[in-house]
Amino acid sequence: MAKWKLIAVHGNKTPGAELKPGDKVKDFRGDEVEIVRLYPPHKPSSSGKVGVKETGSEFERTFFVTVIGAKFVEDNNAKR
Protein backbone atom coordinates (compact mmCIF):
# COMPACT_ATOMS: atom_id res chain seq x y z
CA MET A 1 0.00 0.00 0.00
CA ALA A 2 1.35 3.40 -0.98
CA LYS A 3 2.29 6.02 1.59
CA TRP A 4 1.23 9.56 0.76
CA LYS A 5 2.11 13.11 1.77
CA LEU A 6 0.21 16.32 1.07
CA ILE A 7 2.14 19.09 -0.63
CA ALA A 8 1.31 22.69 -1.50
CA VAL A 9 0.87 23.39 -5.20
CA HIS A 10 0.05 27.11 -5.11
CA GLY A 11 -1.36 29.85 -2.93
CA ASN A 12 -0.62 28.88 0.66
CA LYS A 13 2.98 27.95 1.10
CA THR A 14 6.04 27.49 -1.06
CA PRO A 15 5.14 25.01 -3.81
CA GLY A 16 6.38 21.57 -2.79
CA ALA A 17 6.19 22.30 0.95
CA GLU A 18 4.62 19.46 2.93
CA LEU A 19 1.29 20.22 4.63
CA LYS A 20 0.33 18.39 7.83
CA PRO A 21 -2.50 18.38 10.36
CA GLY A 22 -2.26 21.54 12.45
CA ASP A 23 -1.12 23.70 9.53
CA LYS A 24 -3.20 26.76 8.75
CA VAL A 25 -3.87 27.47 5.08
CA LYS A 26 -6.33 29.45 2.99
CA ASP A 27 -8.99 27.90 0.80
CA PHE A 28 -9.76 29.14 -2.70
CA ARG A 29 -12.12 31.78 -1.25
CA GLY A 30 -9.36 33.18 0.96
CA ASP A 31 -10.85 31.84 4.23
CA GLU A 32 -8.28 30.56 6.73
CA VAL A 33 -8.73 26.93 7.75
CA GLU A 34 -6.72 24.48 9.85
CA ILE A 35 -5.92 21.05 8.46
CA VAL A 36 -7.15 18.43 10.94
CA ARG A 37 -7.16 15.18 8.95
CA LEU A 38 -5.76 13.74 5.73
CA TYR A 39 -7.71 11.36 3.48
CA PRO A 40 -5.15 10.08 0.94
CA PRO A 41 -6.26 8.72 -2.44
CA HIS A 42 -7.79 5.26 -2.28
CA LYS A 43 -7.20 4.52 -5.97
CA PRO A 44 -4.99 5.98 -8.73
CA SER A 45 -7.73 8.14 -10.23
CA SER A 46 -8.59 9.76 -6.85
CA SER A 47 -7.14 13.10 -5.74
CA GLY A 48 -7.80 12.52 -2.04
CA LYS A 49 -9.47 14.80 0.48
CA VAL A 50 -8.59 16.87 3.51
CA GLY A 51 -10.53 17.55 6.71
CA VAL A 52 -10.41 21.18 7.84
CA LYS A 53 -11.83 23.43 10.55
CA GLU A 54 -12.53 27.11 10.09
CA THR A 55 -10.98 29.41 12.67
CA GLY A 56 -13.18 29.43 15.78
CA SER A 57 -15.24 26.39 14.72
CA GLU A 58 -15.21 22.92 16.20
CA PHE A 59 -16.80 21.28 13.15
CA GLU A 60 -14.73 19.45 10.55
CA ARG A 61 -15.52 19.89 6.85
CA THR A 62 -14.10 17.66 4.14
CA PHE A 63 -12.85 19.09 0.83
CA PHE A 64 -10.97 17.83 -2.19
CA VAL A 65 -7.32 18.85 -1.74
CA THR A 66 -7.51 21.23 -4.72
CA VAL A 67 -9.73 23.53 -2.61
CA ILE A 68 -6.66 24.39 -0.50
CA GLY A 69 -4.23 24.42 -3.44
CA ALA A 70 -2.58 21.09 -2.62
CA LYS A 71 -2.11 17.56 -3.93
CA PHE A 72 -1.10 14.17 -2.59
CA VAL A 73 2.13 12.61 -3.83
CA GLU A 74 3.62 9.22 -3.04
CA ASP A 75 6.19 9.47 -0.27
CA ASN A 76 9.11 7.39 -1.51
CA ASN A 77 11.00 7.95 1.75
CA ALA A 78 8.26 6.58 4.00
CA LYS A 79 8.85 3.35 5.88
CA ARG A 80 6.56 0.63 4.63
Image (tube, rainbow, N blue to C red):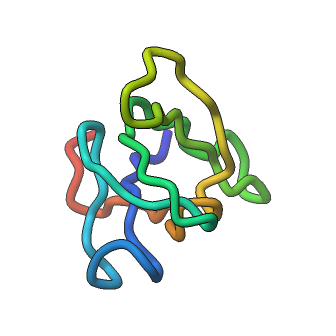
Residue 58 appearing in the image: yes
Q: Where is residue 72 in the image (x, y as percent from the top left)?
A: 50, 60
Q: Tell me: 52 left or right of 5.
A: right
Q: Determine whether 69 is above or below 72 in the image.
A: below
Q: Is residue 71 visible?
A: no
Name the residue rendered at 32%, 79% in the picture: 16
**Split into 4 quadrants, where in the image is the C terminus?**
top left
Which residue occupies the foreground of this view, 61 or 17?
A: 61
The relative height of residue 54 versus residue 18 in the rendered view (above or below) is above
The residue depicted at 52 percent of the width and 33 percent of the height is 51
Whether residue 60 is situated above or below residue 31 in the rendered picture: above
User: Which residue is outermost to the front?
Assistant: 56
Q: Position of residue 70 (x, y in %)?
A: 50, 66
Please state which of residues 49 and 35 is positioned toward the viewer in this rendering.
Answer: 35
Q: Where is residue 53 in the image (x, y as percent from the top left)?
A: 46, 31
Residue placed at 26% from the left, 73% from the top? 17
In terms of depth relative to the viewer, which is nearer, 7 or 43?
A: 7
User: In percent of the image, x 59 and y 56: which residue is there?
Assistant: 65
Find the residue positioned furthest to the top: 58
Q: Which x, y percent locates residue 55?
A: 38, 36
